[in-house]
Image (tube, rainbow, N blue to C red):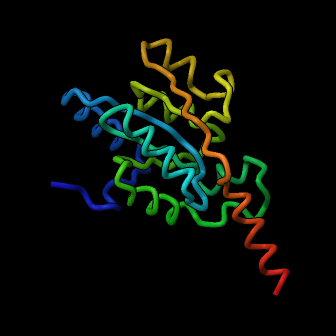
Amino acid sequence: MSTSIKQRIYQNRADVSDLLELWRAGDETIVFTNGVFDLLHPGHVLYLEQAAALGTKLVIGINSDMSAKTLGKGDHRPINDQSARALVMAGLRSVDMVVLFDEATPLELIQVVRPDILVKGGDYTMNQIVGAQEVMAYGGSVQQLDFVEGYSTTAIEQKILKAGLDT
């Protein structure tokens, strides 16, 4: 029986831990990645499909609105609120769990999830990947996936703004 989209979204870390325990008991391989995922684009979708293929369960950490504002992308970001972003992510076939986090980085969430595989895009160096040392210390691995050129939320935002100015 599959879960509904909203049932894949978590804010309570205790509920997250309970489900992860069940998955581990079932010998699932847990993959984790994180981001704001403000305006979902093909680069995100391809990246998440690749991440999901590395294991059997894909957990996505999404910056809450408060957390996203600390990333320096502008006062107007995120464009979509955390509920909308979480719902869109949970609706993707490749995603098994979405967890919102308020902290500036996903480190605390990574320590709760304890993924078998931590994944980030190729636009990050290994020493920029939050949680990499912690995951490798308990025997997990860190994978860097190829960056999909030509897609970014900032580029989409700029295109929309330019189109508005041209009218």
Relative image position of residue 45 (x, y in whole percent): 49, 52
Image quarter in which the C terminus is found: bottom right
Quarter occupied by residue 53: top left
Q: Name the residue furthest front.
A: 149
Residue at the image point whose x is 58% and y is 35% from the top: 146
Vertical placement of residue 64 versus 16, above or below: below
Toward the bottom, the furthest residue is 167
Q: Quadrant of the N terminus?
A: bottom left
Q: How many labels does the image show?
A: 0
Q: Residue furthest right?
A: 165
Residue at 78% across, 49% down: 72
- Whole-percent x, y for residue 163 in the image: 77, 78
Measuring 67% from the left and 32% from the top, which residue is drawn there? 124
119 relative position to 92: left or right: right
Q: Which residue is drawn at 73% across and 59% down?
A: 155
- Front residue of 48 and 114: 48
> Is 151 situated above or below 119?
below
In this rendering, the answer to whether 65 lies above or below 24 is below
**Could you tell me residue 36's position as x and y percent?**
60, 51
Q: In this view, does 24 lie to the left or right of 71?
A: left
As rendered, which of 60 and 39 lies closer to the eye?
Answer: 39
Q: Position of residue 10 (x, y in %)?
A: 40, 51
